[in-house]
């Protein structure tokens, strides 16, 4: 065996990803401070008043936006929101690299999760199957960030076909929706495993597991199709309200799913702030919400690694804060009890 075994490489990769997460947090604090001082990197394209046909034969479409305070007749060119501003800036590069870095890390951790589930028998159950479906969803959701969102944010091209952006968003949203719903199934799976372990195998049968996965993927396709059927004019704004052997392992899995909700709540908070903030402060929250969403998906994959000693042993990782504690030696051990019973039997004789 060589020095660089597969387990060594995987363990090193996990540590590198953890370092990347720390760097991401530092980078986001820096971005917030930068964007608070300057909004030039997010200046929208100037609007034109001409409606007609371009020299290349393409139609210029205009869409009337919903009335807003101070500008009730604002209009924009179809697809203009997908275009860059034509030049690269330091802030664009930092934001784009943060998106690309986190998405790449999430995809790497996702494939590592699939490898671990295949190799470790503790995941050869309904939980493992549900986790595979969730992981596939997160890998698919981050591929558009690697090949589209990240590079576009860095290079800011102005000749992007609107269809390209729509397809990238559709793919990302479809897989993101599936992974989010599957997390709920995983949470229910862990809750039953902890609260009602004797009924676990009876409830989560192979048939139910397959049904949950099928329904989730079908629901994702149904929801994403609604965006192409229901017109945007139906958008409504509400301004009024801006004891079993596996018990410990099941508890770890339960804590794992709870740990994942922390970053998801952060994403929700930033998204609410972005949707209800003034124009001067929305971009910071949008960037933070987008990056925190990717961080949530990365966090989901890392949770499987951090909360399972079997994975630590397989990868050769020792987390000092997560080491197994040695069981306490009770006064009435099996050996002592056996000796006591033997002495009592002799006395009776």
Image (tube, grey):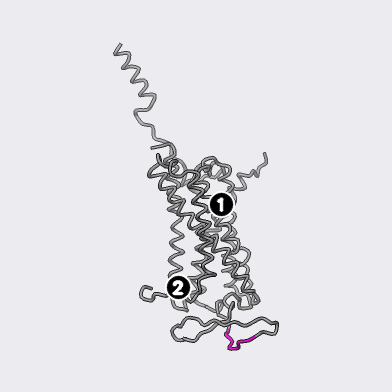
294 displayed left or right of 155: left
Task: Reply above or below: 18 against 345.
Answer: below
Mark 1 or 2: in front is 2
First in sequence, mark 1 or 2: give its number.
1
Extreme residue toward the bottom, this view = 49
In the rendered structure, does residue 49 fall within the stretch colored magenta? yes
Q: Residue at x 38, y 44 (%)?
A: 195
Q: Which residue is mark 1?
A: 15
Q: Is residue 30 visible?
A: no
Magenta stretch bounds: 46-52
Disc 1 to disc 2, how far (Cα)?
35 Å
Q: How far across and how far down the image is residue 114, in percent?
A: 58, 49
181 displayed left or right of 339: right
**The one of 51 and 299 positioned closer to us in this rendering:** 51
Q: Residue at x 62, y 47 (%)?
A: 9
Q: Which residue is mark 2?
A: 275
Tell me the quarter of the picture where residue 336 sits. Answer: top left
Secondary structure under badge 2?
helix
**The one of 308 and 189 positioned closer to us in this rendering:** 189
Tell me the quarter of the picture where residue 61 sits. Answer: bottom right
Q: Main secondary structure of the magenta part?
A: loop
């Amino acid at each position: 065996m060589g020095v660089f075994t597969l387990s060594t490489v995987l363990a090193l990769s996990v540590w590198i990803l953890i370092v990347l997460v720390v760097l991401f947090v530092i980078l986001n604090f820096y971005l917030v401070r930068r964007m608070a001082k300057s909004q030039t990197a997010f200046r929208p394209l100037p609007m034109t008043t001409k409606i007609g046909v371009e020299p290349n034969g393409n139609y210029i479409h205009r869409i009337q936006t919903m009335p807003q305070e101070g500008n009730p007749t604002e209009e924009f060119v179809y697809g203009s929101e997908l275009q860059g501003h034509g030049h690269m800036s330091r802030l664009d590069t930092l934001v784009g690299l943060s998106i690309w870095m986190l998405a790449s890390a999430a995809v790497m951790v996702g494939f590592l999760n699939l490898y671990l589930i295949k190799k470790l028998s503790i995941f050869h159950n309904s939980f493992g199957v549900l986790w595979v479906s969730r992981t596939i969803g997160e890998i698919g959701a981050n591929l558009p960030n690697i090949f589209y969102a990240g590079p576009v944010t860095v290079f800011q091209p102005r000749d992007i076909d609107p269809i390209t952006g729509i397809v990238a968003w559709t793919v990302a949203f479809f897989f993101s929706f599936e992974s989010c719903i599957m997390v709920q199934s995983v949470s229910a799976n862990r809750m039953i495993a902890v609260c009602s372990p004797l009924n676990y195998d009876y409830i989560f049968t192979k048939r139910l597991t397959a049904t949950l996965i099928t329904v989730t993927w079908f629901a994702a396709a149904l929801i994403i199709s609604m965006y192409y059927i229901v017109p945007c004019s139906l958008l409504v704004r509400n301004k009024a309200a801006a004891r079993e052997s596996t018990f410990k392992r099941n508890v770890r899995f339960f804590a794992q799913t709870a740990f994942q909700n922390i970053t998801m709540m952060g994403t929700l908070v930033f998204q609410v702030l972005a949707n209800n903030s003034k124009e001067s402060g929305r971009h910071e929250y949008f960037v933070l919400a987008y990056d925190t969403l990717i961080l949530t998906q990365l966090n989901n994959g890392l949770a499987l690694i951090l909360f399972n000693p079997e994975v630590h042993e397989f990868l050769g990782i020792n987390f000092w804060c997560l080491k197994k504690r040695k069981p306490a030696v009770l006064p009435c051990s099996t050996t002592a009890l056996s000796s006591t019973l033997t002495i009592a039997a002799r006395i009776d004789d």
